Image (cartoon, rainbow, N blue to C red):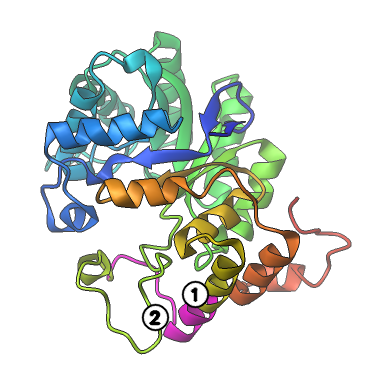
Amino acid sequence: MENRLLGGSGLKVPVLSFGVGTFGGGSQFFDAWGATDNLAEARRIVDICLDAGVNLFDTADVYSNGRSEEVLGKALEGRRDQVLISTKATFRLGHGPNDVGSSRYHLRRSIEGSLRRLGTDYVDIYHLHGFDALTPIEEVQESLNGFVREGKVRYIACSNFSGWHLMKSLAVADRYGWTRFVAHQVHYSLIGREYEWELMPLALDQKVGALVWSPLGWGRLTGKLRRGQPLPAVSRLHKTAGAAPPVSDERLYQIVDALDAVAAETGKTVPQVALNWLLQRPTISSLILGARNEGQLRQNLGAVGWSLSAEQIAALDKASDVTPVYPYWHQRQFPERIPWPV
């Protein structure tokens, strides 16, 4: 398994990591991902990951209301020193007025709760799950810096920030000499390339590594969705389609057709090709994989150890290209001054 530096930090992470949103279940949304509530099954998944060199596990306090962290913590008992744990806070966990957001109050309660559920005294990567526009950025960044100084957190990161959210947070941290974000967990795939418009150039400039969530586009790039065919009987899209970003059928099928052609050339599967394409993009530190079962996990692990050709990447780029929103469509016309990120 290839390992890459996480942004501008000295921490190396595997290019494939495992997201344990499938651990715990407990709601229609998370059950749609998969419900690995059996500890033996969770340990089996962890075993497979570690055997393949996947030692980064990603969770969040809100996944199944804390059950994901609990199951992961139990599955990792006796081998905490072999793994990297990433978890998140900010989203609502509780019914009180302060049970949401990135205030000092909520973040303190969140990190203590996550450590307790995970059965550890520190997490390796601690994310803000989303931006909190109501809490002063100084309060947020100072709180995170405090967690690092206390040894409860090794590195800090964010998720789902816009460009100005991320840049302002970095600027505040730099102004006061506080720990800065080294990673940004982002939505990115062949059917969701908005990350490239502003966040990728920012990440290159500021040395912020990308941890990619939903690299198969909410399950649309598994090879199971085809022209003229209904959704497969087992698909998360039956229950989570409303939360997934929209994509037209024609654009999806155009991308899948291109993936099919490259898969035939390489002898790989459609999802393996889609994941390998992402691994060739600038700023990518790790792709966060999810899997309902051992078979899905083993297939996704086959996305590494080989590389697409320049011609194959160009074909996938062309099939998945979309005109960006303003000002990015305008800036695209001036590559002499605003070159493509490399």
Labelled disc at residue 324: none
Cβ atoms at labels 2 and 1 below 8 Å apart: yes
Amino acid bearing label 1: Val
Task: Tell which residue pokes out farthest to the bottom in this image.
Answer: 228
For label 1, count other residues whose C-alpha is less than 10 Å away and answer few (under 14), some (14-19) or many (20+). many
169 versus 176 height, above or below: below
Give whichever of 266, 301 is nearer the camera.
266
The magenta stretch spans residue 251: yes
Q: Position of residue 232 (x, y in %)?
A: 25, 74
| Residue appearing at x 22%, y 24% in the figure | 73
Q: Position of residue 326 (x, y in %)?
A: 64, 72
Residue linked to disc 2? 226
Q: Position of residue 83 (x, y in %)?
A: 39, 22
The residue located at (52%, 52%) in the rendering is 162
**Residue behind mark 1:** 256
Residue at the (57%, 53%) spot, across then down: 276
Q: Quadrant of residue 318?
A: bottom right
Asked if residue 219 lies left or right of residue 197, the reply is: left
* Nearer the observer, 200 or 326: 200
Say which quarter of the image contains residue 80. Answer: top left
Image point (39%, 17%), residue name: 82
Going by the numbered disc 2, the residue's amino acid type is Arg
Number of numbered labels in the structure image: 2
Report x, y in % for residue 174: 62, 26
Label 2 or label 1, whichever comes before in sequence order: 2
Q: Secondary structure at mark 2?
A: loop
Identify the residue at the far top of this view. 150
- Measure the alpha-carbon separation of dots 2 and 1: 8 Å
The region drawn magenta spans: 242-255
